[in-house]
Image (cartoon, rainbow, N blue to C red):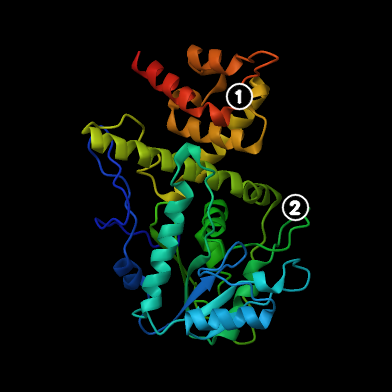
Amino acid sequence: MAGQTDMSSNDANGATLVTAGGKQAIHPHSLQELQAVLDPMAQVFVLVDPLVSEPFALEEPGTLAGLQAQREAFWQRPLTRIELPGRVALPVHHHPYLVELQGRTDPLLAETFERAQADRVRARADGLDGVGMSAQPIGGWLQCSLYGEQLAQVLLPLLQVNTEARTDAKYLRLTDRRVLALLRSVVGDARIECCFGALQAWASLDVHGHITVLRSHGAIAENQTPPRLRLSREEWLQMMQGASLHRILDMSLGALEQQAGLASRLEAAPRYSAALTHRPGAELFGPAQAALACANEAAQRWPHRFTGPQDFIVWGALSLLHRSLRSVKGVPPSVDELMRDQGTPDEPAEPLRYQHAEVSRRARDSAHD
């Protein structure tokens, strides 16, 4: 896609995934690679999303002034709150903010990068036994030649929903790197970048921990404003699936990392598809959408196994991990038998989220037959 910077690296900050063929999967990037894509002549800002949590342990502040004092004490850098418009029903202390760094060699660049990578890994740490979620307060690293207050004004239009669809949503939470990643997949980089104006670059992590960079298409005249990104109804509906898609990807990738770790301890190569671990993060949302559709189909066939949202996420992740589960009508007979079992009135069948290990075992066994 236009403007995207995707780099390859042999430096890994996480587990190496290896297929039976011995090929290495995509590795997370390093701090040095982040520094390499940053312009040494431009300001660097950390974009912080405190909606779920701050990047630091927070004492009960009591007041907004108390919260600001804690932030200033932690960061020891100039801070600028991005004041969202009143129609965005979000408490002020949850509004995003900017931290102005002292260039790309600032020690806080390393701290925020390491925190962002750790949060990304935490979301998938438990594989299919987890929930595929964790707070991700580090939204990325922005560059421009503006003061913090000016940059906040440039960002405001990007953070507001503008769509042809009927919706009550007002806040487009691009401060969460996962939302930005999905938007890139839905509309393409060029449509986002042409809205940047004086924002020169926006670096963030994808699902693999790769650094990707969006770059402005160039300066605009002082009396002009960049165009606003407007989403079609279909594009907005894709964005609304984001929470489920991110969880499906994190849980399935986490399960693969668990398999790889087990295989290395047993000195045996794991048997699974490399479709997830070897494809760029931007290319994974399509398979995740197909997996979510497959989960909805599975729920219609075996409704007693789908009693909550987590069951849909689990089946979606399973369908990415096992090719034989990607068509509900074509699942192995042993899996169909398990899923059809409704138990007894005294002991009803368990929801899928408690049976994923057995489903995986049967899917693997059928592949070896």
Please tell me whether residue 122 is drawn above or below residue 91 in the rendered image: above
Viewer-closest of 146 and 99:
99
Q: Which residue is mark 1?
A: 350
Query: Residue 330 — which label?
Result: none
Local SS, label 1: loop
- As measured in the structure, the alpha-carbon distance from the residue carrying label 2 to the one carrying label 1 is 38 Å
Residue 67: percent from left, percent from top: 62, 78
Q: In which quadrant of the rendered image does the C terminus lie?
A: top left
Residue 117: percent from left, percent from top: 41, 59
Q: Which residue is mark 2?
A: 165
Local SS, label 2: loop
Q: In which quadrant of the rendered image does the N terminus lie?
A: bottom left
Residue 256: percent from left, percent from top: 38, 38
- At x 78%, y 57%, the residue is 168
- At x 40%, y 40%, the residue is 276
First in sequence, mark 2 or 1: give its number. 2
Circle 2 crowding by C-alpha within 10 Å: few under 14, some 14–19, many from 20: few
Residue 95: percent from left, percent from top: 65, 71
